[in-house]
Amino acid sequence: MSELRVKVWRGAADGSFREYVVPRHPSQTVLDVVIHIQRALDSTLAYRYACRVGMCGSCAMTVNGVPRWTCRTHVDKVADKGELTVGPLRNLPVIRDLVSDMREFFDKWARAKGHFKGSATRSEDFARIAPQS
């Protein structure tokens, strides 16, 4: 099994990066890496995630300088020579480690009053989508 060297932001806005060595696995996501660090190497690491399927955006972090949803970002696509750098989102205040203060984002979302009103009911079957579409 190969290893992955990961630099992770620790602390608040005035924090710094700390390096960890993580086992590398096939089909591994950046979120898998962060979870491994928190569960196996450093239980004090703070981060956020919810759905793990790329719908909610709560796992968004900066990966190698690019904002990404870590649950959908595969290590094989972004690791540079077996290394990753993971930090909080740069455009939001840092609460701690990889957790950004999302209040400003959600306040804007609420002011926009966006909503979805579907036309189907729960008793109707799912819409069929042809594979060739």
Image (cartoon, rainbow, N blue to C red):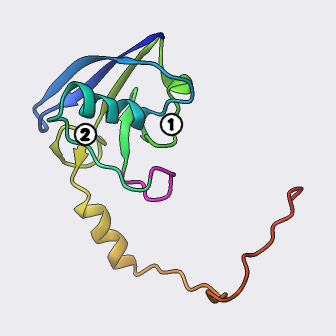
Relative placement, left or right, of 102 versus 14 is right
Q: Nearer the viewer, residue 16 or 123?
A: 123
Amino acid type at circle 2 is Leu
Residue 120 at x, y percent in the picture: 67, 87
Q: Please give left or right for residue 127 compared with residue 131 in the image.
A: left
Secondary structure at numbered mark 2: loop
Identify the residue position indicated by label 1 in the image. Answer: 73
Q: Are marks 1 and 2 in contact (CB under 8 Å)?
A: no
Image coords of residue 12 (percent x, y): 12, 38
Q: Which mark is residue 56?
A: none
Q: CA distance from mark 1 to mark 2?
A: 16 Å
| Residue identified by numbered label 2 | 98
Prevalent SS, magenta region: loop
Mark 1 element type:
loop
| 54 to 105, vertically: above or below | above
Of the residues shown, which amino acid type is indicated by label 1?
A: Thr
The 10 Å Cα crowd at callout 2, few under 14, some 14 to 19, many 20 or more, is: many
Q: Residue at x 21, y 54 (%)?
A: 101
Residue segment shown in magenta: 52-58
Residue 74 at least partly seen: yes
Task: Please report the residue visible at 31 percent of the width from the left and 62 percent of the height from the top.
Answer: 105
* Mark 1 neighbour density, 10 Å: few (under 14) some (14–19) many (20 or more): some
Residue at 20% x, 20% y: name it.
18
Which tag, 1 or 2, sits closer to the chain's start?
1
The answer to whether residue 59 is above or below residue 32 is: below
Quadrant of the frame with the C terminus: bottom right
Determine whether, in the image, residue 124 is placed left or right of residue 23: right
Q: Is residue 128 above or below residue 25?
A: below
The residue lying at 16 percent from left, 25 percent from top is 16
Q: Can residue 17 be found in the magenta stretch?
A: no
Question: In x, y percent, where is residue 48?
Answer: 29, 48
